[in-house]
Image (cartoon, rainbow, N blue to C red):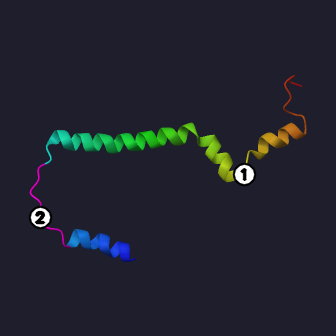
Amino acid sequence: MRFLFGFLALFVWSAPVFAYIDPGSGSAIVSAIIGFFVATGMLVKTYWYKLKSLFSGGSKSQNQSDADGSNDSSGN
């Protein structure tokens, strides 16, 4: 709670800053933000099944089909 109050106080009592961000810098910042979200999405997509099995406790359907022999390599 104390951290939140200090963080909000930073914005309430901040002094005006006379700085200029040109359009090139602005587009670079926006591109970096978009790139971060795309990279995060690709990382999640790459490891989706590993993350899913981690939170669900493993793949139960694969283990059940192996136990009754219905998923053998001969196709029978």
Q: Which amino acid does label 2 sit on?
A: Pro
Residue drawn at x 78%, y 43% as measured from the top left: 61
Q: Position of residue 37 (x, y in %)?
A: 41, 44
Instruction: Read off the residue under disc 1.
Output: 57
Q: Which amino acid does label 1 sit on?
A: Gly
Q: Position of residue 74 (x, y in %)?
A: 87, 22
Q: Left or right: where does residue 58 sit relative to residue 44?
A: right
Residue lying at the far left in this picture: please name it: 18
Residue drawn at x 18%, y 68% as measured from the top left: 14
Residue lying at the far top in this picture: please name it: 74
Look at the image and say whether residue 16 sits in the magenta stretch: yes
For the C terminus, give its image quadrant.
top right
Q: Pick the residue in front: 59 or 13.
A: 13
Q: What's the mark number on residue 16?
A: 2
Q: Left or right: where does residue 75 sit relative to residue 37?
A: right
In the displayed structure, 19 sits above or below 71; it is below
Residues under numbered marks 1 and 2 in contact, where contact means CB atoms less than 8 Å apart: no
Query: Magenta stretch?
Result: 13-20
Secondary structure at badge 1 equals loop
